[in-house]
Each structure stands twice: as C-alpha cells, then as structure tokens.
Image: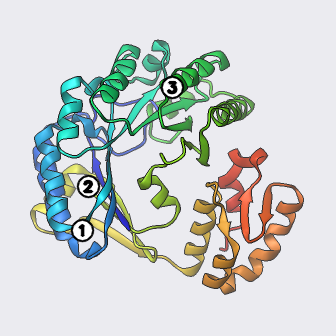
Amino acid sequence: MSGIYIHIPFCKQACIYCDFHFSTTLKNKAALLTCINKELELRKEELTHEPIQSIYFGGGTPSICTKAELAVLLETINKNYAVDPSCEITLEANPDDLTKVKIDELKSIGINRLSIGVQSFFEEDLVWMHRAHSVKDATACIDHALQGGISNISVDLIFATPLLTDDKLEKNIKILTQLAIPHLSCYNLTIEEKTSLHHLVKLKKVVPVLDEVAVRQFYFIRNHLQQQGYEHYEISNYAKPGSYSKHNTSYWQRKKYLGVGPSAHSYTGYSRSWNIRNNETYIRSLTQNKLPSEMETLTMNNRFNEVLLTGLRTQWGVNLTELKQEFQTQYTSFQNQIIPLVNEAKLIVTEDKLTISPSFLIMADRIASELFII
C-alpha cells in the first residue's frame, strides 16, 4: 500500500509559527494547480500497480481550493493510479473555510476525512498565533462536519505557547473529548528559523515558555486523553481505536509515498526526493515537462537511522528481529549503544521490541539521535 501527498501552497495569512512553504497571494493558483495535475501524470510510473491507501491534501491551506479544483486533482489521481476502494482521503482545513456548503461539496467529491487546524478554543491565543479563524468558526465547523456526514475528523492543538495556561489547556482538551473527536494531533510549539515567531524571540518581544512547562503540558495531555480512551500511538498523535491516520502511519512505518506540488517530499524506502520550494520555478519547470526535484539515494546508515527515528516515536517501537535482519552491520554496534540507555530506563526492551520509556517520550528524537550510526 502507498500514499499520495499533495501540497497546496496557499494561505489567507501567515501564522506566527509556520515554516511550511506557502504564499498569501493567489495570483498563480490556477497555473500551479494545473502543474500539480501534470506532475501527477508525469510520475504515475513511480507507483505502478501499487494500491493507493491514502490521499492527503496538505499545505498551506488546501481548503482554500474550490470543489471543482479539488475534483480535478482527484480525477487525475483516479485516472492514473490504482486507488484502493477504502482509500482515506484527507483534506487539511482552516475552520473558517468549513461552511455547511463546503462540507457538502467536499463529501460529494470523495473527501472522507478532515484535519482541522483549530489550535486553541481561546480567542486571545488565535490572535497571538495570527490564525484566520475565530473560536466561533472552530466550534461551528466541527458541528457542520458531523452533521454533514464526515465524522472521521482530526483536530490540531498547539501547546506550550506563551498565553496558554494549564487551565486553558485543560479546557481545550475537555471541549474536544466532549465532542468525541476521534483523532487529535497535539503539537509542542517550536520556534523555527525564518518565521515571525523566531524574529520576535530574537527581538525579545516574545519569551518562550520554560521547558518544564512544555513537559508538564505534554504529560497532562497524554494522561487525560488516555483516561478518555485515546491511544497515544505517536508522539504528537492520539486516536480512538480504529481511528489512526492511515497517511501519517505510513510515514512512521516507512511505506512508500509520492509527494507532488512545490516543496513536497517523496519516499521509496531506498531513496528520497523533494520538489523545489518556489512556486514560480515549479510552474516554469512543469510547463516544460520537467520535474523540479532533487533526489538522494539513502545509504544503509541513513535507512538504519530512519528506522530508529520513526519507530521510536510510535507505540509500536522498533522490531529488533527485523532490524537485525535488515541491518546486520549496523546492528552490531547498536547493541552496545542501547545498553546505557536501557540502564537509565530511557529505553525498554520487551521480547524483540524496543520502545521509549513513557517518562522520556518527549525526548524521543534526542534519544533516537544518540543511537544513530554516522
């Protein structure tokens, strides 16, 4: 099973923390969508005869697209790829875009899952983040989706922001659990270079929260959601049984996926490629039937490190038997490297599975990097 990711690089406005590739002007929107369709056609041989189990519209803000624009992209995919009948088709959306009419349109063209960027149910937080929607939009769009027949919903929340107290975080979580949202993605605010937030921190106009606050809020979310029946299946992701994201799970389980659109990445298991992060260059290249991408072949060390980085972020951990079979050379030194981390209770070995101790989950990436083979 494979997946297709489509990057729609347009937003109404720039959020303070976002470092994804996007543009707030729509002047090249029609031309760019035409080129995404062309890229899908040009790259169809990369997933020949492989059932597509997930299609994911990300961005940017894909919900900025019209029904007709999204329908054309889906038609191109269905024409050129073997789409599984049970394919999960997700659209990332801003709450202010999800009117009753929009929900009906999305459902009519096959969208069966929504990932909604709520981030907070407090107006002051949304203003600080420079989000385009209001709290009223956030609650209304969830009602619209449920009433419109799209119950497979994921909601994004951000914690460890300067204005987010523990009490506000608790209220955010309670709202979502009371609504019985089946999937939640809870992200620790990170300060990425070249973002407005990074600039404000450098100017000392924003003071980042203390690490201890981020840790406390992370474990509050984890404990509360687990008590409510959610499974913490990846560092930032929680789901009711049977509601895991097929798309995101494929990333963590290293399944093949095709990424189209400017800045999108693709992965085969043995190589990784990425498209140019510039809309005009992307359009110019595709207009000339050229793929605007670069590729690297992954070394055995690269692949080994990636297994650790992705696996240790999940509840499934790393299968040691499979790791030894696939990476015999790397496994020899790895065996010695895990000993001190096991002794420090940071790693847990159960039968043939290696996982991060719950007390150190928030440090998963750092712990995995200590095991990398250079």
Please tell me whether mark 2 sits on a helix, a strand or a loop.
loop
Q: Which of pointers 2 and 3 indicates the residue nearer the eye?
A: 3
Nearer to us: label 2 or label 1? 1
Mark 2–mark 3 CB contact (< 8 Å): no
- Residue 240: image quadrant is top right
Sequence-wise, the earlier of marks 2 and 3 is 3
Dot 3: what SS?
Answer: helix
Q: Amino acid at mark 2?
A: Gly
Picture coordinates of residue 271 (x, y %)?
42, 75
Residue at horizontal 29 percent and vertical 33 percent from the top: 149
Q: CA distance from mark 1 to mark 3?
A: 35 Å
Q: Which residue is mark 1?
A: 82
Residue 282 lies, with reference to residue 148, above or below; the image says below
The kind of residue tagged 1 is: Ala
Ranked by sequence position, the earlier of labels 1 and 3 is: 1
Query: For the residues marked 2 and 1, what is the alpha-carbon distance in whole angstroms?
Result: 20 Å
Residue 289, x across and y down, in percent: 12, 68
SS category of the residue bearing label 1: loop
Closest to the observer, 133 or 85 = 85
Mark 1: few, some, or many residues within 10 Å (few <14, many ≥20)?
Answer: some
Q: What colour scheme does the image use?
A: rainbow
**Which residue is label 3 attached to?**
176
Residue 40 vertical position relative to residue 218 in the rendered view, above or below: below
Q: How many marks?
A: 3
Residue 131 in view of the camera: yes
Which residue in the structure is indicated by mark 2?
261
Is 255 displayed left or right of 339 in the figure?
Answer: left
For label 3, count other residues whose C-alpha is less than 10 Å away and answer few (under 14), some (14-19) or many (20+): some
Image quarter (top left, top right, bottom left or bottom right) of the N terminus: bottom left
